[in-house]
Amino acid sequence: MSDVESWRKWRTRRDTRLRDPHGTLALTGTHWLDEEPAPIVEGQPVLWSAGPEAKTVTLTAKAEHGLVLNGEPIDGTVTLRTDTDEHPDTVTAPDYDILLVPIERDGSAALRVYDPKAATLQAFDGIEAFDFDPVWIVPARFTPFAGPHVEKVLNADGVVRGLGLDGTVEFELEDGRHTLQAALTTGGRLWIVFADPTTAEAKPFFRFLTTPAPAEDGTVTLDFNRAYLAPCAFTDHYVCPLPPKGNTFESPIRAGELAVKTR
């Protein structure tokens, strides 16, 4: 399969995932939780609270409230594992087709609510993106840091949080040599947050890039044709991290996704 054919399939998969009834565009709220049990919406009888170190979330409900965990109605108090756990839990409200996802971010717990009737999902009309250009597929080399590295960065919701970074990626573009900080993700892949003048006036002004796992010698390929919009480009309920130091280009990266199109 050629690079352009692979890119087209990636674009199709990306669009399909975004249109998922409980995907990125369906998020209607991120509700931060305290240790004291409380409803996420005032007046609701269902109570939520953050567990120890925000690694878990506690939920108290009656069977009549219609919440389901692992196929069984919730009737009492249950402990839910957040999305940073190896085996996270989710709760559904089948009568309303709602998905409830406990999350943990930098020591704070929250509950995300996904609704197929979300206005953002109903209005979505695709993504504006550059045409494929092989010039933006570049060889690079990943160099891991000597130990754990956490940088405090501003997030899209205005809160400063720690961003775990695992090394640097070096590569050449037409305007010279560049070095970006990157994080290792599932399967050893690299995840990069970067900004450039192309999206300087957009919201958000930065994008993400994921690469294959580097080889043993650190070599890896960056394909900026697959630079993608952060979740906070689709709805304000995400807490995307802004680029860390050094991850902002002076020259435009004319590749990848640019903006969300709406009806």
Image: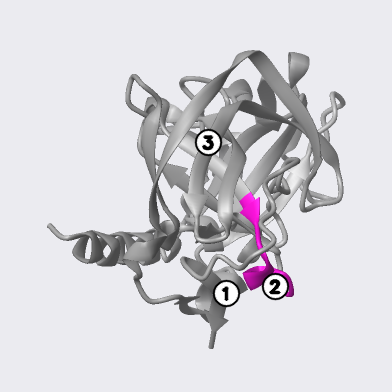
Disc 3 target residue: 169
> Residue 211 appears at what percent x and percent y?
41, 42
**Of residues 41 and 73, which is closer to you in this image?**
41
In this view, 148 is above or below 238: above
Q: Specify which label sits upstream in the sequence, 2 or 3.
A: 3
Residue 198 image label: none
**Disc 1/disc 2 C-alpha distance (Å):** 7 Å
Disc 2 target residue: 202
Disc 1 target residue: 259
**Does residue 37 appear to the left or right of 222 in the view shown?**
right
Q: Quadrant of residue 85?
A: top right
Q: Specify which label sits upstream in the sequence, 3 or 1.
A: 3
Q: Give me the residue at 78% from left, 46% from top.
A: 155
Residue 67 magenta-highlighted: no
**Of residues 239 and 55, which is closer to you in this image?**
239
Q: Specify which label sits upstream in the sequence, 1 or 2.
A: 2
**Does residue 137 appear to the left or right of 163 in the view shown?**
left
Mark 3, secondary structure of its residue: strand
> Residue 13 appears at what percent x and percent y?
31, 60
> Residue 53 appears at what percent x and percent y?
76, 16
- Amino acid type, label 2: Ala
Q: Is residue 83 visible?
A: no
Q: Mark 2 and mark 1 in contact (Cβ < 8 Å)?
A: yes
Q: Give me the residue at 38% from left, 76% from top.
A: 131
Q: How many marks?
A: 3
Residue range highlighted in magenta: 194-202
